[in-house]
Amino acid sequence: MLRSVLIGTGSALPRQAVSNAELAKRVDTSDEWIVERTGITNRYIAAPDETTTTLATEAARKAIEAAGIEAASIDLIILATATPDQTFPASATLVQANLGCRGGIAFDVAAVCSGFLYAVGVADSMLRTGMARRALVIGAETFSRILDWEDRTTCVLFGDGAGAIVLEAQEQGGETQRGILATRLHADGTHNQLLYVDGGPSTTGTVGKLRMKGREVFRHAVVNLAEVLREVLDEAGLSTDDLDWLVPHQANARILDATAKKLNLSPDKVVMTVAQHANTSAASVPLALDQAVRDGRIKVGDLLMLEAMGGGFTWGASLIRV
Ligand code: UT7
């Protein structure tokens, strides 16, 4: 059976780390409040010369190097982002040019914090139907550019960064097939006023700033994520006990704890990077994944569940045998 096999991961962070204490000098907040409510202690903020595309390119180069392939052999690039360098062209085409790949497919996916999961789902479908052979799937964001730095309820929560993976279409057989085993994606647009940006090319002609009703998003996140994780496990005929790692979207340590509890999953199996990176939207899952691959926790043969939930609402999960 043709499967999309994970053959490399990479990530990139801006140069500047910003602590909670530094933020407390700018807005009425405290390290204690941020740590207690979110688990965040630090985030990285892009300088003017660091953009979604530069971070995406760096993460992509590392993933390509880890995969041990030539960049030119990539025939599909999907970049998940809500903070593209320009309204158009797609940032994926800029990354394609930076990497020196030509002629393949390149486009952006907009599903905010779930963007990486959506991109993985689309890439997997395209690889398994033969539209491409090697896919670069990237999540990259510079949310610092769309934050209202006077709004303490949102500006302390987010950070910038990028993560990337290379997927390759391979024939797999036998009991322990490598690759993406199942993916489920969902959206419910009736909730789009709970997490949104108050501007855009077709409405205000401006970029706009992020607005969120955090408590309500939290409530939906725990329910939706637990449901979609079960759905994906059911589709694959597996159970929580089979999982080696949960690599979740890193919005809030409390959401991760609550989701793990709902699933009866040991907290030791949850990859948590929210303390260091904060919420990097579409970048958070591949950033966490790359960290756990590079520090040796995730190994070939492990069964991973990736999941995310964000603006729209959109949410999804994907089960991968590394
Ligand atoms: O990535 C997309 C998905 N996004 C998420 O999953 C985010 C989900 N939501 C959350 O993570 C949490 O709801 C937040 C971290 C955003 C907020 O935590 P909370 O426990 O739900 O707090 P809250 O919004 O209910 O606010 C509690 C209090 C309020 O004060 P009053 O009204 O009780 O007097 C806020 O004004 O905390 C206050 N507050 C702050 N205080 C100090 C809000 N932000 C801050 C702050 N510093 N930065």
Image (tube, rainbow, N blue to C red):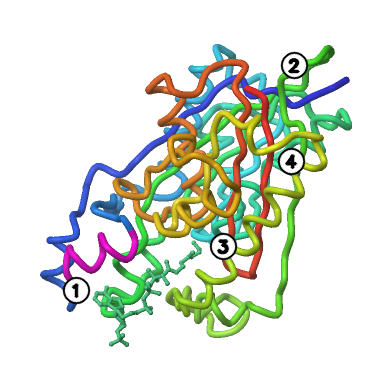
Task: Say if the magenta span includes residue 37.
Answer: yes
CB at disc 2 and ligand 1 closer than 8 Å:
no
How far from the left and from the top, in percent, is residue 52? 44, 49
The mark nearer the N terminus, 1 or 3, is 1
Which residue in the structure is indicated by mark 2? 176
The label nearer to you, 4 versus 1, is 4
On the picture, is 149 further left or further right than 20? right
How far from the left and from the top, in percent, is residue 115? 61, 53
- Dots 4, 2 in contact, CB < 8 A: no
Look at the numbered disc 4 and give the secondary structure of its residue: helix
The mark nearer the N terminus, 3 or 4, is 3
User: Main SS type for the magenta part?
Assistant: helix
The mark nearer the N terminus, 4 or 1, is 1
**For the point 60% across and 55% down, which residue is it?**
114
Which residue in the structure is indicated by mark 1? 29
Quadrant containing ligand 1: bottom left
Which residue in the structure is indicated by mark 4? 233
